[in-house]
Amino acid sequence: MRRPAISIPSNIAEGAARGSDAEYIHFMNIALGSASKLETQLIILNRLGFVCGIFSQSKDLVGIKQQPIGLIRYLQSKKKQPSPLTFHSSPFIILNNQHYGKDKTF
């Protein structure tokens, strides 16, 4: 249980230190996997009778898992939006409110 508990913040920190959003998302997904692993281990320990009161820990883990999910969604939506410096080619050129198509000369 220690390994996935340490792995969650470690992967978040490593992803944040990387240079791209794609790598950050990758490490956030690894952190989510570790959180799921920890949640599964807590459920198993509860079923075997080794721990009691698992509900509060599971509820905390759900909250912990929601934070990376929200960040991943934000980073993915950021990728889908065109950059303000991106130029899109157009078949028309506008000069002095006159439209010229590709086949027209001006």
Image (spheres, helix red, strand yellow):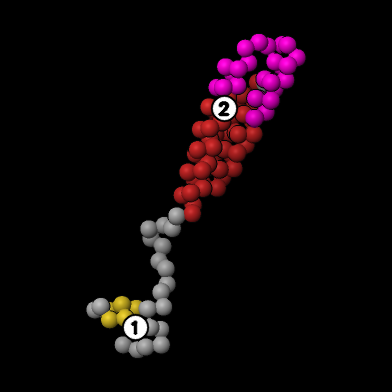
Q: Residue furthest right?
A: 48
Image point (73%, 11%), residue name: 49
Give how far apart the Cα atoms at labels 1 and 2 are.
Answer: 57 Å
Residue designated by label 2: 62
Residue designated by label 1: 100
Horizontal relation, residue 87 to residue 73: left or right = left
Residue 63 at x, y percent in the picture: 53, 27
Going by the numbered disc 2, the residue's amino acid type is: Val
Going by the numbered disc 1, the residue's amino acid type is: Tyr
Image point (59%, 29%), residue name: 8
Is residue 68 depicted above or below 99 in this figure? above
Look at the magenta stretch and give its main secondary structure: helix
Q: Answer few, some or many: residues within 10 Å of disc 2's Cα (few below 14, many 20 plus, some between 14 and 19).
A: some
Q: Earlier in the sequence, mark 1 or mark 2?
A: 2
Residue 41 at x, y percent in the picture: 70, 22
Horizontal relation, residue 25 to residue 2: left or right = left
Image point (25%, 78%), residue name: 97
Q: Quadrant of the C terminus?
A: bottom left
Is residue 17 depicted above or below 63 in this figure? below
Is residue 59 depicted above or below 25 in this figure? above
Residue 37 at x, y percent in the picture: 67, 28
Residue 82 visible in the picture: yes
Q: Which residues are magenta?
A: 36-60
Dividing the picture into quadrants, the one containing residue 28 is top right
Which is more toward the observer, 64 or 2? 64
Which SS class for mark 1?
strand
Which is more toward the observer, 38 or 17? 38
